[in-house]
Amino acid sequence: MGSGNGELLNLTLKVWRQKNSKAKGSFETHQLKGISTDMSFLEMFDVLNEKLISENKEAIAFDHDCREGICGMCSMYINGRPHGPKHAVTTCQLHMRSFKNGDTIIVEPWRSIAFPVIKDLAVDRGAFDRIIASGGYVSVNTGNAQDANNILIPKTAADESFSAAACIACGACVAACKNGSAMLFVSAKVSQLALLPQGQVERKERVLKMVQQMDEEGFGNCTNTGACEAECPKEISLENIARLNREMIGASLT
């Protein structure tokens, strides 16, 4: 946890504490002094937890894994924004230089019926896994690795599929949406496969099953406000939602 040569901050943290999904939660206030602006947001939370443990108090539960902006586990709702104030970054890539000395920082979990709280800031995002399991796969046996030009794919389609595949399923889109919609996530996963020849076999069945599972999980309807795209750390485009709607209409008619 680098101290570096950055400035030192004194901060007030208001952190959501909740024993489990059934318990009533509340905010807990903590004072932190001497936080380096070179620290990441998660490193700052490590310092806070070390302080709590040294005081024989229970550490704050939060999700994290790679801390490299790849996995999307670091799901924190910071001062009213998923992943905090910086654009197109995950919480683990947010650094304390984005805050000022004396700031009050409010940290909450993703709030959605479909994401029940496990504890404190950690939520169960198994709903995303179940949506993927319902249809986000390719069953064609592709055999050995193909030569690079053996399956011809238009560059535009390949680029659009790659952009959709950049979704890391963090759930920021759900947290940002006032209806708790998962349309951006589902549309990215549908688009990723619908644009490629390998994904054509299940194309119609896939979209119907994934949207049905999304609805069964309790996610809300799309608001069309674009908050999901604005807060997505991988800048997944709303064009994918338009494609999902077209895929749904085509599959429903045939």
Image (tube, grey):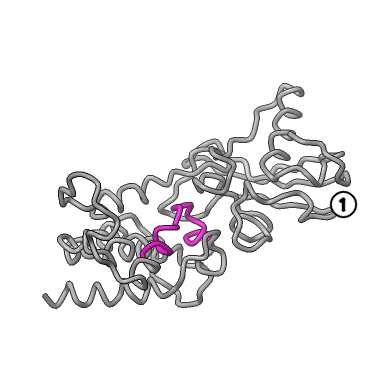
Looking at the image, which is closer to me, 30 or 249? 249
Looking at the image, which is closer to me, 109 or 130? 130
Residue in the picture at 78% in, 44% down: 38
Q: Is residue 43 above or below residue 93?
A: above
Pick the quarter of the image with the N terminus. Answer: top right
Q: Is residue 82 above or below residue 20?
A: below
Q: Characterize the magenta stretch by its predominant secondary structure.
A: helix
Magenta part of the protein: which range?
161-175
Figure label count: 1
**Relative side of 137 to 236, left or right:** left
Q: Is residue 73 above or below residue 135?
A: above
Question: Residue 206 at x, y = what percent?
Answer: 21, 61
SS class, disc 1: loop
Q: Is residue 163 magenta?
A: yes
Residue in the picture at 81% in, 47% down: 37
In the picture as drawn, the residue positioned furthest to the left comes out as: 254
Residue in the picture at 21% in, 53% down: 138
| Residue labelled with disc 1 | 101
Question: Residue 82 at x, y = what percent?
Answer: 59, 57
Residue in the picture at 74% in, 52% down: 105
Question: Residue 148 at x, y = what percent?
Answer: 30, 56
Name the kind of residue labelled 1 in the image.
Asn
**Relative side of 179 to 8, left or right:** left
Looking at the image, which is closer to me, 213 or 148? 148
Q: Is residue 27 magenta?
A: no
**Relative side of 252 to 156, left or right:** left
Pick the quarter of the image with the C terminus. Answer: bottom left
Question: Residue 224 at x, y = what percent?
Answer: 45, 77
Label 1 Cα crowd, 10 Å radius (few <14 / some 14-19 / many 20+): some
